[in-house]
Image (cartoon, rainbow, N blue to C red):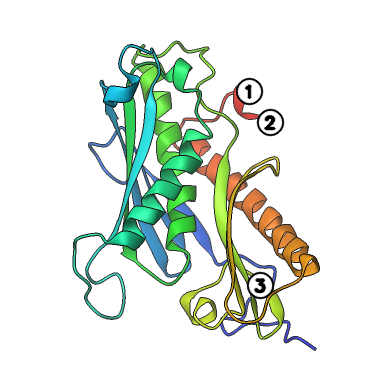
Amino acid sequence: MPNPLRPDGRRPDELRPAEIITGFQKHAEGSALIKCGDTWVLCAASVEERVPPFLEGRGKGWVTAEYGMLPRATHTRSPRQGGGRSQEIQRLIGRALRGAVNTTALGPRTIAIDCDVLQADGGTRTASITGAWVALALAIAGLKKRGLVAPTARVLGEPLAAVSVGIVDGDPRLDLPYAEDSQAEVDMNVVMAEAGKIIEIQGTAEGAPFSRKDLDLLLDLATRGIQKLCHLQRQALEKAGAALPLECGS
């Protein structure tokens, strides 16, 4: 029978202690430091009054992302420049965020989100997406406050977040730290909107194939975890004085 407690004392269906601190960077149009256990990611949103060449003259905006890890985010120093893994993750972050934005209502401007991992203990890409959405929401709220976007414009969709799930020692678990992720039989990252609609799933059987029943169990775990993370996002925005409008759900 699976052990109900994990190495850090959590239940299989329990998130790591999480916190979102808004306004962490003074000069960014929106910023948030997200802490998920010992994984800390600084997310900063910058507004640029231009769009990529392929969008010029179309009246639409763009959302993009960059991702990187500080050299001592892990136990050993790694080079500062990003590699293929960083590029794959930043494309994932950008895709997720663009799914939450009405680019026509945003207008012909770009919001660039920089996600810098200060400390890594598994789940850096999922923490980046969750924190980046808050930074994005703050940047859009700032555009409305400055009159650059109409106050009633429906720019932002419902909250979205991401979390890791996996099977470790035959046990489905939520929000894996590195110690569990590195030995998981199944490793999966799920990006989902607050209401439960799936944006992206990245899942791999590290050993033997897993069943459809296991997949459903993992998605159920992810859904509950993401709903809690979305609640945390809303609390962070309310504390920052940028509570979400009705367009983003109740």
- Residue type indicated by callout 2: Ser
The residue lying toward the viewer, choosing from 145 and 227, is 227
Of tags 3 and 2, which is closer to the observer? 3
Quadrant location, the N terminus: bottom right
Quadrant location, the C terminus: top right
Indicate the position of residue 146 as horizontal and vertical percent values: 33, 16
- Give the left or right position of residue 238, taking residue 3 as reference: left
Task: Mark 2: give few (<14), some (14-19) or many (20+) Cα within 10 Å.
Answer: few
Indicate the position of residue 23 as horizontal and vertical percent values: 34, 41
Q: Which residue is mark 1?
A: 246
Q: Which residue is mark 2?
A: 250
- Give the left or right position of residue 91, taking residue 209 as reference: left
Of tags 3 and 1, which is closer to the observer? 3
Tag 3 and tag 2, C-beta contact below 8 Å: no
Residue in the image at 21% along x and 76% along y: 77
Q: Compared with residue 116, is residue 210 higher up or lower down, i.e. above or below?
A: below
Indicate the position of residue 130 as horizontal and vertical percent values: 49, 49
Indicate the position of residue 53 as horizontal and vertical percent values: 27, 23
- Residue type indicated by callout 1: Leu
**Which of pointers 3 and 1 lies earlier in the amino acid sequence?**
3
Tag 3 and tag 1, C-beta contact below 8 Å: no
Q: Which mark is residue 150?
A: none
Q: Quadrant of residue 196?
A: top right
Q: Which residue is mark 3?
A: 173
Residue in the image at 27% along x and 61% along y: 83
Q: Compared with residue 91, is residue 159 higher up or lower down, i.e. above or below?
A: above
**Which of pointers 3 and 2 lies earlier in the amino acid sequence?**
3
Tag 1 and tag 2, C-beta contact below 8 Å: yes
Cα distance in 3D space between marks 3 and 2: 29 Å
Q: Compared with residue 242, is residue 133 higher up or lower down, i.e. above or below?
A: below
Residue in the image at 66% along x and 72% along y: 173
Q: Is residue 190 visible?
A: no
